[in-house]
Structures are given as C-alpha cells and as structure tokens.
Image (tube, rainbow, N blue to C red):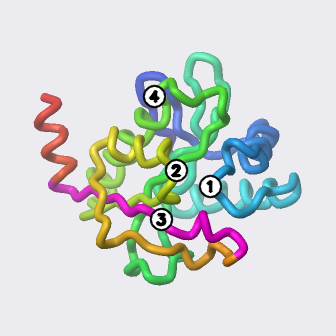
Amino acid sequence: MTPIRTERLVLRNWEERDRDLFHRINSDERVMEFFPFRRNRTEADAKMDEFRATLDRQGFGWAAAEIAATGDCIGFVGLSRTEDTPFMPTGTIEIGWRLAPEFWGHGYVAEAARAWLGYGFETMELEEIVSFAVAANRRSTAVMERIGMRADPTRDFDHPRVPDSHPHLKRHSFYYMTANDWVGQKKAAG
C-alpha cells in the first residue's frame, strides 16, 4: 500500500518492528473488552502477516497507524471487506480500528478514519462505507458519530461469529456513511 499521511499520523503497511505492539493490542483485556477472543503471540503474528499480505495485494486493509513525529506504532485503522460477515452484501466495505490504550483520547482514530473515508470515497469511489460494534461499545460508536457516520438501527444485528458463550457481545450497532454524506461533510467543512 501507499502510505497515507495525516496531520499527525502515517497509515502504512505493517513492519517487523510492529509485532510486539500488534500482539499487545490483540491480547490486552481493555482493548479486547468487546471481543470474545484474545490472541497469543503465534496467533497475533499470523494475523499481522495476513493483514500485511492483504495491504500488499489490494492497497487497503487494516493498516498500521504510526505517530509521524515519533515513529511509534499505536495500533491500526483501515478499511476492510466484510466477507467474514455472511449477511452483508458482497462488496461491502467497513471501517474499523484498534489502538493501544495509552493512545486513546487523543483523536488519533478520528483523524485516521477521516483519511480512510476520503480514500474510500475519493480513490476507491465507494458508494457506502459501514461500521459496526458491540452495542455496549460506546467508545467505538462515539468515534463513528464523531466522523459523521449515522446509526441505522434497522440494520443492527447479532454477529454470527460471536459464540453463544458470549451473549453480551452478540448484538452489534450498525453505522454507515454514503458518498453523498462525505461530499456534504467536505462542503460544510469549507
């Protein structure tokens, strides 16, 4: 992938130096509070390799987010196909993120997500980008609202990959943004 630069961040492909952080965010109890699994080091390494290969192959995916001034990787933000969510229409693209806790509350996710929305609507020419999170995950849904996505309760769903052993994680809130919404936001921002 070609790196995307924002005011404070570089959104780029994964590098070997990112492995420790990637494992940490996939095994940290606070980060993974709304997920039914934690990844050990071997699983995290395999997932990072998968993310890197996807970014190489298609030019978008779950990209590393790095603070430009320090070179510190803080987590990931990106766009991804929803093929693992079987009831989503083919071609649906979601936006998502996961950061280490010490980087929460600084506006990094919103900054990176806006850059990815721009890429999705302007470069990929998508008609819609979606996002979803466990209904109780207010941190994520607040970001969705902050970046201008709209809730669509008629599209809320029970995630088919969440096991019955975690019923409190099944229900997901659905958000979306259309290309027209994006254009309107840009005009309003002037």
Taking depth in this image into account, of 43 and 164 the one nearest to the observer is 164
Tell me the CA gap for discs 4 and 3. 23 Å
**C-alpha span from label 2 to label 1:** 7 Å
- Return the residue nearer the eye: 5 or 30: 30
Residue position marked by numbered label 4 in the rendering:
107
First in sequence: mark 1 or mark 4? 1
> Residue at point 12% right, 34% down?
188
Q: Nearer the viewer, mark 1 or mark 4?
A: 1
**Whether residue 133 is situated above or below residue 92 in the rendered picture:** above
Query: Which numbered disc flags the more N-terminal residue, 4 or 3?
Result: 4
Residue 137, label in figure = 2
Q: Is residue 151 above or below residue 156?
A: above
Label 1 sits on residue? 34
Q: Position of residue 114 (x, y in %)?
A: 36, 40
| Residue nearer the viewer, 95 or 104 | 104
Residue 65 in picture, x, y percent from top left: 57, 37
Magenta-span inclusion, residue 177: yes
Q: SS of the residue at dot 1? A: loop
What's the CA distance linking mark 1 and mark 4?
A: 20 Å
> Tags 1 and 3 in contact by the CB under 8 Å rule?
no
Task: Give the residue at mark 3.
Answer: 172
Question: Which residue range is magenta in the image?
Answer: 165-180
Gap between marks 3 and 2 measured at Cα: 9 Å
Crowd tier of the residue under label 1, counting other residues whose Cα lies within 10 Å: few below 14, some 14–19, many 20 or above:
some
Q: Nearer the viewer, residue 79 or 123?
A: 79
Q: How far across and how far down the image is residue 19, in percent?
A: 79, 43
Residue at the top extreme? Answer: 69
